[in-house]
Image (cartoon, helix red, strand yellow):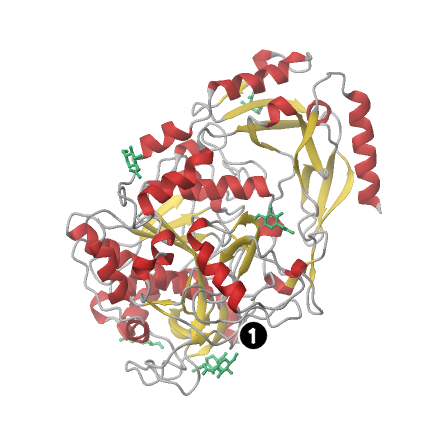
């Protein structure tokens, strides 16, 4: 009730305030609020906002074609990656966009020119404005919102904001407007054992499911249906490899503080599973004050790092991108800012609302400046955290997704877990027909994860060894403990590289749901999968079990990194964006196709794993030897 009244009031106020004849259009809107937030009052008109206007990047409409040119195996330019300087130059916003925005801000006399600043990279125009000025400029109303869980307050505009049509086409997004700090959504620990409680949950995103302690240590392959070890994964994916060019190769794992690890746990893990690596540690790359915190949750970091280090093997350095301080934490944009200066919001800053802002002046906060383009990149970056698309706005997701694409042009590969809730979202939330996230036990629309739907990341689902089966038997989509995240994006359209694969699935194995349950025209995910059940990790000195697509992503990232090593050793480039190659006919037969299991959610059985690509396990699990041979044959 309240919300629909607000819309009407907002628009009426805008109509009477608009003097200029320019036609205004809705620039961005959100149909629903992120879970937990509700408006408590109008914002005071004299509150100051750091209004930041992100300009559209040049040539973004060609990004997909540029990427296909260097990443499709049939392209004569395969592997001819770009330099970071070429990327920055090609996508830099045009001066025309800067002028259009500046002119709009000054033309009716509300903001004078001295108040306007343009960022060094030319991507952002900024001015400190009052709420009253922002409401006038954007044809909207600002409200103070409060979060039900912790009473945290947040200023945002309601419903949507408007721009003159001729300005709108130069603008990507404006903050602070509709963007909410969604990392506030902590997904309570799903653990029920003592060990699980100690390990805790992930800061935000896919929380790995904790099992009990491992009672006996298996070093052979007899028990891979009960406990997954490095040896099981090597057997499952034919993955025996010794690095040849570790000095040239790079791989990184991202962790978001307060998620952390205990360094001595590496020795317990390696002592049991990879003796020659005892003493090895990851190389810390601290982003926005990221450091190892004590007393934080350690399940996710221990899992990701122990398995990547164990799988890529002795000799290969593994980078740990630890993002954010222990108080406000960080999100994907904090990482991207640190890797690419041209992505930073404003003079080395982040989006002040959707992402964590530094310096953090709270006690114990990181007082340094935000990292901006000053951190080393890695060829493969593995991330086991995620959002739901419904948590974020399309413009925010599209901008971030394009950034994965731009970085991939330089030869990087982004690997993400696909989520642990089947076709529903965290906490079994599904979407109502307005796009709100609501409990989905009795059935509503599927709730896709982000960034699984971004075509420029490789999304990884989970499989398992069926109880009683051997490591040589075909795996199933995971069905114990959690269902593999998968489905179709509501934001990103079906990607070109997957057109045939997805059409094949929908035609041959139509899921039979009402068309509104999922967006059949959206990008289908995951792309591939890997075992995600009962990984044995060391945590707080003991071995315990952990499950989730959180485990699957590091496994896939490690295998792709070994392929990079083999190519670099013979003078070739990294593999970069792998999706067009994986779906191409060149790579037919390089996967173990998974044809059993489903990913239930929202009161349904979800989708079913079937021959070929499916929205549960993607193309299947990796066959390292077969992939390596094909990638080595490519230029
Ligand atoms: C390959 O790269 C060259 C040189 O950068 C470019 O002119 C050409 O358009 C690219 N694509 C193809 C398909 O040749
Ligand atoms: C906006 O205000 C802040 C805080 O006073 C200041 O640091 C910043 O430089 C100002 N930005 C602009 C564009 O004037
Ligand atoms: C592996 O996971 C399943 C499902 O949670 C569980 O029933 C089984 O006991 C686990 N295996 C071991 C050895 O704990
Ligand atoms: C193996 O793990 C156990 C914890 O379960 C630990 O006490 C032991 O020291 C480890 N073994 C080695 C050789 O490190
Ligand atoms: C389906 O996906 C497309 C992008 O391919 C998007 O434009 C559309 O809004 C989505 N439909 C729904 C109902 O979310
Ligand atoms: C197929 O998956 C179901 C769970 O969905 C499981 O009960 C069954 O054992 C699996 N069968 C095979 C052959 O993998």
The local secondary structure at tag 1 comes to loop
Q: Closer to the camera, 95 or 137?
A: 95
So how many labels did they put on this image?
1
Question: On screen, 559 above or below 193?
Answer: above
Extreme residue toward the bottom, this view: 468
* Category of crowding for the residue at label 1, using alpha-carbon neighbours closer than 10 angstroms: few (below 14), some (14–19), many (at least 20): few
Q: Which residue is mark 1?
A: 192
Q: Position of residue 632 (x, y in %)?
A: 21, 56
- Position of residue 491 relative to residue 428, above or below, is above
**Point 58% across, 20% down: residue:** 101
Q: Nearer the viewer, residue 6 or 73?
A: 73
**Left or right side of 547 for 139:** right
Q: Position of residue 69 (x, y in %)?
A: 33, 42
Ligand 2 quarter of the rendering:
top right
Q: Is residue 393 left or right of residue 400?
A: right
Q: Is residue 533 visible?
A: no
Q: 542 above or below 624?
A: below
**Residue 147, x across and y down, in percent:** 69, 49
Q: Residue at x 41, y 88 (%)?
A: 468
Q: Position of residue 286 (x, y in %)?
A: 38, 45
Quadrant in the picture for residue 221: bottom left
Q: Is any part of residue 99 visible from this angle?
A: yes
Give whichever of 590, 218 is nearer the camera: 590
Out of 600 and 565, give the one closest to the viewer: 600
Outermost front residue:
507
């Amino acid at each position: 009730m309240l919300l629909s009244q607000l819309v009407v009031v907002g628009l009426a106020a805008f109509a009477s305030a608009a003097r200029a004849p320019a036609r205004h259009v809705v620039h961005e809107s959100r149909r629903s609020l992120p879970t937990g937030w509700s408006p408590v009052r109008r914002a005071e008109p004299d509150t100051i906002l750091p209004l930041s206007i992100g300009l559209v990047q040049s040539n973004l409409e060609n990004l997909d074609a540029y990427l296909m040119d260097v990443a499709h195996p049939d392209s004569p330019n395969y592997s001819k990656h770009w330099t970071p300087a070429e990327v920055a130059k090609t996508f830099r916003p045009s001066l025309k966009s800067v002028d259009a925005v500046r002119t709009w801000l000054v033309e009716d006399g509300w903001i004078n020119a001295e108040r306007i600043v343009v960022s060094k990279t030319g991507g952002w125009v900024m001015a400190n404005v009052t709420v009253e000025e922002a409401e006038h400029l954007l044809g909207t109303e600002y409200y103070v919102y409060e979060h039900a869980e912790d009473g945290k307050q947040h200023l945002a505009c309601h419903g949507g904001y408007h721009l003159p049509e001729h300005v709108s086409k130069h603008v990507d997004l404006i903050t602070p407007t509709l963007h909410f700090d969604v990392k506030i959504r902590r997904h309570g620990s799903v653990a029920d054992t003592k060990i699980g409680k100690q390990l805790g949950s992930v800061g935000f995103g896919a929380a790995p499911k904790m099992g009990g302690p491992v009672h006996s240590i298996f070093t052979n392959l007899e028990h891979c249906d009960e406990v997954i070890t490095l040896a099981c994964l090597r057997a499952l994916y034919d993955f025996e490899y010794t690095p040849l060019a570790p000095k040239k190769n790079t791989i990184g794992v991202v962790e978001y503080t307060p998620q952390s690890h205990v360094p001595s746990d590496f020795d317990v893990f390696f002592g049991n599973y990879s003796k020659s690596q005892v003493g090895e540690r990851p190389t810390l790359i601290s982003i926005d004050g990221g450091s190892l915190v004590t007393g934080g949750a350690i399940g996710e970091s221990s899992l990701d790092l122990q398995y990547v280090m164990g799988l890529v093997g002795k000799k290969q350095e593994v980078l740990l991108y630890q993002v954010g301080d222990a108080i406000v934490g960080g999100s994907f944009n904090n990482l991207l800012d640190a890797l690419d200066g041209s992505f930073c919001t404003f003079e080395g800053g982040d989006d002040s609302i959707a992402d964590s802002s530094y310096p953090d002046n709270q006690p114990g906060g990181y007082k340094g400046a935000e990292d901006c383009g000053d951190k080393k990149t890695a060829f493969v970056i593995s991330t086991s955290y995620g959002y739901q698309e419904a948590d974020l706005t399309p413009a925010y997701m599209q901008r971030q997704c394009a950034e994965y694409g731009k970085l991939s042009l330089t030869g990087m590969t982004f690997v993400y877990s696909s989520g642990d809730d089947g076709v529903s979202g965290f906490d079994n939330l599904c979407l109502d027909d307005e796009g709100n996230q609501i409990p989905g036990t009795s059935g509503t629309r599927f709730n896709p994860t982000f960034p699984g739907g971004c075509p420029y990341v490789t999304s990884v689902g989970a499989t398992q060894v069926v109880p009683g089966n051997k490591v040589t038997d075909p795996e199933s989509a995971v069905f114990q403990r959690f269902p593999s995240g998968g489905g179709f994006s509501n934001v990103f359209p079906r990607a070109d590289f997957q057109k045939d694969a997805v059409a094949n699935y929908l035609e041959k194995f139509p899921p039979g749901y009402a068309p509104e349950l999922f967006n059949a025209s959206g990008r289908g995910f995951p792309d591939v999968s890997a075992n995600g059940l009962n990984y044995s990790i060391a945590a707080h000195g003991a071995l315990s079990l952990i499950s989730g697509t959180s485990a699957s992503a590091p496994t896939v990232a490690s295998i792709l990194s070994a392929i990079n090593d083999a190519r670099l050793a013979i003078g070739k480039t990294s593999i970069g964006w792998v999706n067009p190659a994986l779906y191409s006919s060149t790579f037919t037969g390089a996967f173990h196709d998974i044809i059993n299991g489903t990913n239930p959610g929202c009161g349904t059985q979800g989708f079913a794993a079937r021959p070929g690509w499916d929205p549960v396990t993607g193309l299947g699990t990796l066959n390292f030897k077969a992939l390596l041979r094909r990638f080595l044959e490519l230029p």
